[in-house]
Amino acid sequence: MDYGAAGTALTSGILFGYVLEQAGFASPGKLTAQFRFTDWSVFKVMFTAILVAAVGILLLQIDDSFGSRGFYIPGTALGAVVAGGVFIGAGMAIGGYCPGTSVVGAMSGRIDGLVFALGMILGIWGFSFEFDTAWMQQLLHSGEIRQKTIPALFGISPWMVVAALTALALVIFLMGSRLERRLREARTTPALSIDTHSDS
Amino acid sequence: MAGPARPLWPPYVAGIVLGLVVILTFVLVGNGVGASGLFARAAAALGMGLAPEATTHNAYLGSMVAKDANPLASWIVVEVIGIALGALLAAVGAGRFLLQLDGAGKVRAHSRILLALLGGVLAGFGSRIAAGCTSGLGLSGGAMLSIGGFVFLLAFFASGLLVSAMLRRVW
């Protein structure tokens, strides 16, 4: 690895870590609150970021600026992606972090973030023992798809996909904010006075 | 830290800035942001320290240390060092840095440590099956409108929801 590559990695990482912390992603309570619907920040931050980045990348791809038509597209074995997603989702519900946020949590002083990170190394050792077994190899290659992107799969314009995702995101943002408010009110309002709430 | 902690960025502001960081990363390197790759390389490096023979011959870790290669000489390692520095900078700058065991108010300290460890084990195992995590697959894949990216996010969310509901009495 040359100094140029290290420089881009460091720049990208510092910005990424800085934003994740400012978004509140260092806190396991905030991250797992999304799974309880009491705080929709994680969904809002993630979906907004995906849409902003998708639009930017599509704009770059018009003239193939920065070789953008060749940008890397991950995740082609859908069976492996689903299995991995299930494990990582469970890991977040139990431990309070995902891989990147455990680093952010640890660096904001959270010992549990560091413990989660150590746990990840143990989990990867576990994976390395299973790696060349028949079932794992089968799982790693299950559900291989030829079309990598949603627009390619449906044969439609990527802008249509972005428009549809934006509409979906707006609906979920709205519903999420309402649900968030209602759940918070329910939690802070004593049980007896709940019926006096007219709006709900 | 002296003084009150500053408020977090509003979610939409954080989302827009995060999206711009993802674009910048693609422009600079040709792929998006990631995180879990570092842990695979750290597992290989630690393995070399503890059990070099077994690590070299391991079908998965061995490829990262073949021909005396340094498993830590990789883009993703420097990227995650960056993430750590950026997070530290933000936490200290906003007065949010605090040495603590977070979540220990709801469960006992040793339970919290066990939960964090178990969660980490599952996430580490899963990140190698999917060959990515919430950053590399969900965020960067989603930005490329990748089918795998959105399928990952759906599976991640569904599983998190279910396990979180089962754990309601724990924390």
Image (spheres, helix red, strand yellow):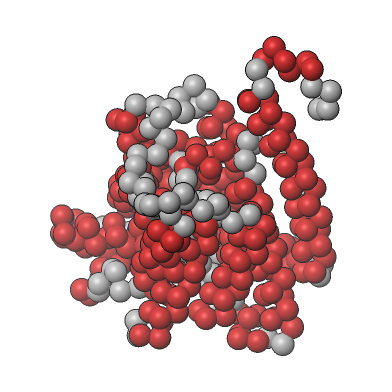
Give the quarter of the image for residue B84. Answer: bottom left
Q: Is residue B13 left or right of residue A106?
A: right
Q: Quadrant of the C terminus of chain A?
A: top right
- Residue B49 x/y as whole percent: 16, 59
Q: Residue at x 29, y 69 (%)?
A: B72
| Residue that protrudes farthest toward the front in the picture | B3
| Looking at the image, residue B76 lies above or below residue A122 | below
Q: Is residue A172 left or right of residue A188?
A: right
Q: Residue at x 36, y 48 (%)?
A: B98
| Looking at the image, residue A28 lies above or below residue A143 | above
Q: Residue at x 52, y 81 (%)?
A: B28
Q: Quadrant of the N terminus of chain A?
A: bottom left
Q: Nearer the viewer, residue A193 or B123?
A: A193
Q: Tell me, yes or no, if residue A1 can be seen here.
A: yes
Q: Residue at x 65, y 44 (%)?
A: A40
| Looking at the image, residue A114 lies above or below residue A71 | above
Q: Nearer the viewer, residue B154 or A56?
A: A56
- Residue B18 x/y as whole percent: 59, 64
Q: Tell me, yes or no, if residue A103 can be seen here.
A: no
Q: Is residue A170 left or right of residue A142?
A: right
| Residue that protrudes farthest toward the top in the picture | A192
- Residue B73 x/y as whole percent: 30, 74
- Residue B8 x/y as whole percent: 55, 53
Give the quarter of the image for residue B44. Answer: bottom left
Give the number of callouts. Answer: 0
